[in-house]
Image (cartoon, rainbow, N blue to C red):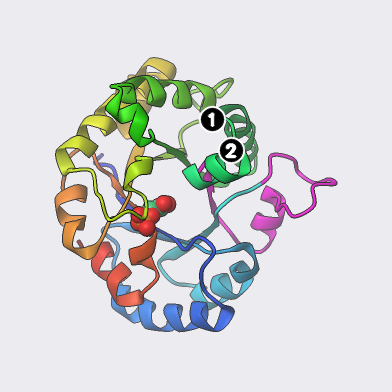
């Protein structure tokens, strides 16, 4: 079975409710009937109910950019997996580099969140990737291995089946610098090999690995066209309906 690509929009902390609604109205006709790839939007928590309602019955899934690892509790400002599920969210990003960089998310926290998402049937998109100094020091493989081993600690092969990984080299996020398709494919192959070591060859062969970092309509085909690249996690270019639809239809 070939891996079905997932094309995902990470809206980060952008869009007012009216803008989110306008996006959905413009976007849905552009991707109507598109079933070659899975499509998912990751808006801010306050936008989730409105976006989910507007997309009801469509071919577009909705997820959160983050969940807490606890099911409930005194964690001011956080959103739980159960709350996400209750409003109809089906996916979540975990360990995005901006969460790691600005909110102190460690591999241990990523691991706890991954356990929680899987326990509640939420599709986790686990983000990994090296910063520029690590790449320049030739440490990319080591960084990816550490992040993956941390993320998957205590997770069984059976439980890990729904997991999606997003390779996002931090130096390519929001910078306009994209990894070349060959560089991305090389990192994806390393990730797949490491997942194989951690969880077995079969699950590694089936796991989707997305690329993220300055994906645009102009480079989407070359990137997603790589055998090793199973979709994209798109930031800036996902904010406009026509540009994100063009990426979906790479
Ligand atoms: P850009 O597409 O804006 O580089 O962002 C990538 C990203 O962080 C997606 O999660």
Quick check: which quadrant has ligand 1? bottom left
Q: Position of residue 69 (x, y in %)?
A: 69, 39
The magenta span reads 68-96
Kindly identify which residue carries mark 1: 159
Could one spot residue 44 in this view of the protein? yes
Residue nearer the viewer, 135 or 29: 135
Residue nearer the viewer, 69 or 158: 69
Secondary structure under the numbered disc 2 in the rendered image:
helix
> Which residue shows up at 64% across the image and 37% down it?
119
Q: Within 10 Å of the Cα at label 1, are there few (<14), some (14-19), or many (20+) other Cα atoms?
A: few
Taking the image as shown, residue 206 lies to the left or right of residue 114, namely left
Taking the image as shown, residue 60 lies to the left or right of residue 30, namely right
| Magenta-drawn stretch, dominant element (helix, strand or loop) | loop
Taking the image as shown, residue 133 lies to the left or right of residue 99, namely left
The reply to whether the C-beta atoms of the residues labelled 2 and 1 are less than 8 Å apart is yes
Q: Is residue 234 above or below residue 187?
A: below
Kindly identify which residue carries mark 2: 118
Q: Position of residue 162 (x, y in %)?
A: 47, 39
Q: Is residue 58 above or below residue 25?
A: above
């Amino acid at each position: 079975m070939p891996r079905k690509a997932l094309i995902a929009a990470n809206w980060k902390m952008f869009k007012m409710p009216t803008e989110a609604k306008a996006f959905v109205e413009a976007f849905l006709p552009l991707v109507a009937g598109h079933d070659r790839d899975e499509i998912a939007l990751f808006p801010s928590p306050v936008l989730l109910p409105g976006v989910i309602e507007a997309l009801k019955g469509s071919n577009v899934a909705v997820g959160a950019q983050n969940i807490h690892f606890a099911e409930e509790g005194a964690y001011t400002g956080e959103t739980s997996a159960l709350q996400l599920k209750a409003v109809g969210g089906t996916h979540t990003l975990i360990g995005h580099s901006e969460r790691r960089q600005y909110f102190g998310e460690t591999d241990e926290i990523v691991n706890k969140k991954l356990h929680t998402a899987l326990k509640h049937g939420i599709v986790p998109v686990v983000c990994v990737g090296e910063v520029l100094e690590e790449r320049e020091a030739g440490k990319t493989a080591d960084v990816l291995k550490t992040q993956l081993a941390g993320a998957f600690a205590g997770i069984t092969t059976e439980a890990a089946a729904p997991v999606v990984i997003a390779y996002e080299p931090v130096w390519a996020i929001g910078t306009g610098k994209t990894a070349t398709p060959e560089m991305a494919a090389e990192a994806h192959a390393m990730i797949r090999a490491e997942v194989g070591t951690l969880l077995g060859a079969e699950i590694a062969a089936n796991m989707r690995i997305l690329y993220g970092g300055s994906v645009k309509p102009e480079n989407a085909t070359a990137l997603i066209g790589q055998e090793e690249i199973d979709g994209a996690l798109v930031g800036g270019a996902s904010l406009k309906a026509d540009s994100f639809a063009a990426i979906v239809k790479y």
